[in-house]
Structure formats: C-alpha cells, structure tokens
Amino acid sequence: MHVFLTGEKGIGKSTLLKKAAESSGLRLAGFCTVSEARQENRPVNIYMVPFGEDPVPEVTPVVGVKKVGGNPAVFDTWGVEIIKKAEATCPQLFIMDELGFMESDALKFQNEILRILDSGIPVLGVIKPRESAFLNSIRARDDVKLIEITIENRDFWDGKILK
C-alpha cells in the first residue's frame, strides 16, 4: 500500500511526511523538492534532491520556477537519475515529496514514478491537490491511500500516517 498526503499549500504535509519517514525505522530513499529562499524581485527556483539532502544551487539543476512552471527535460534526466539511484539502495520505503503539476510534460519521469509504484516498494509521498492526468492516475490507483491534511486534522495525523 502506498500513502500520499494531500492538502493546501503550507499546511504541513512535508513536515508530517518527514516525521513519519524518520520515525518508521525503515531504510529510506527517494526524493524531495525544495524551494530556494524568496528574494525580492527574483523568481523562486525549485530543486529536486535525494531525500535527506539539501540542494547546492551552484550544481543542483532547477526543475522549475514558482509561478512559471517546470522544466520537463530536467525532470526527465536529473529526476529519473535520482529515482534510479534511490531504488538501487533497496529502500524499504520510497519517499516522493512531492508530485505536482510541474512534471506534467515530463513523460520519462512520470513513467519512473509509475514503475516505482508498481515495484512492490511501499511509497510515502505528497501529491498536490491539482487536476492533471498524471496526478489523477496516481490518486485512482487501488493501492494508494490518500490522506487529506488540513489545519484541523494535521495534529491528529502526527505519528499515525504509516499505522
């Protein structure tokens, strides 16, 4: 069974995911997306990094820019590379933080995500509450449990996501 957290921006989905993953005691691997710090009059770059690592802006490719969109070529190269390297570590839990609209045109990346979901490795992830064929196909899977995180229930889910 795969578990994906969803909910509005800034509600605490990634925080809950990290707590659940780190307290699981399982061997973890996967990816997370990280936004750079906002600077006045400058677009905000978004990076994808292996789970547990921080981006190095000088060398980490930009997968997208907030309020502009994603870079499918980077998802299809860098993103696929991160997934394959993570899988090679034989994780007991694969982390996907997060799936959203920026990868809508990154078909190789999407295929890798679907391959991991079919691989038998349990996935803990975050999925944006936006409509797209890719995101909808994940939400519609029989082996996916979707947990909507809200301001009212986020404390309830703390410590219970993987139970």
Image (cartoon, helix red, strand yellow):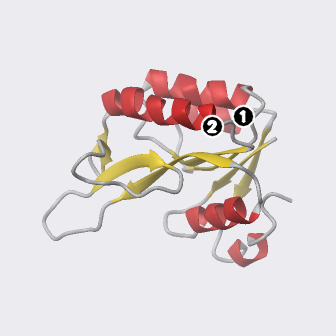
Q: Is residue 8 left or right of residue 94?
A: left
On the image, numbered disc 2 is attached to which residue? 89
Determine the residue positioned at 50% across, 68% down.
10
Amino acid type shown at disc 1: Ala
**Residue 44 location in percent, x, y?**
26, 58
**Residue 48 left/right relative to 30:** left
Who is closer to the viewer here, 135 or 160? 160
Instruction: Please report contact status of discs 1 and 2: CB closer than 8 Å, yes or no.
Output: no
Does residue 10 sit above or below 57 in this rendering? Answer: below
Judging by the rendered image, the residue that carries numbered circle 1 is 140
Q: Secondary structure at mark 1?
A: loop
Q: Amino acid at mark 2?
A: Thr
Which quadrant holds the C terminus? bottom right
- Residue pictured at 72% horizontal, 26% vertical: 118
Q: Quadrant of the N terminus?
A: top right
* Residue at x 63%, y 37% (from the top left corner): 89
Cα distance between the residues tagged 1 and 2: 28 Å
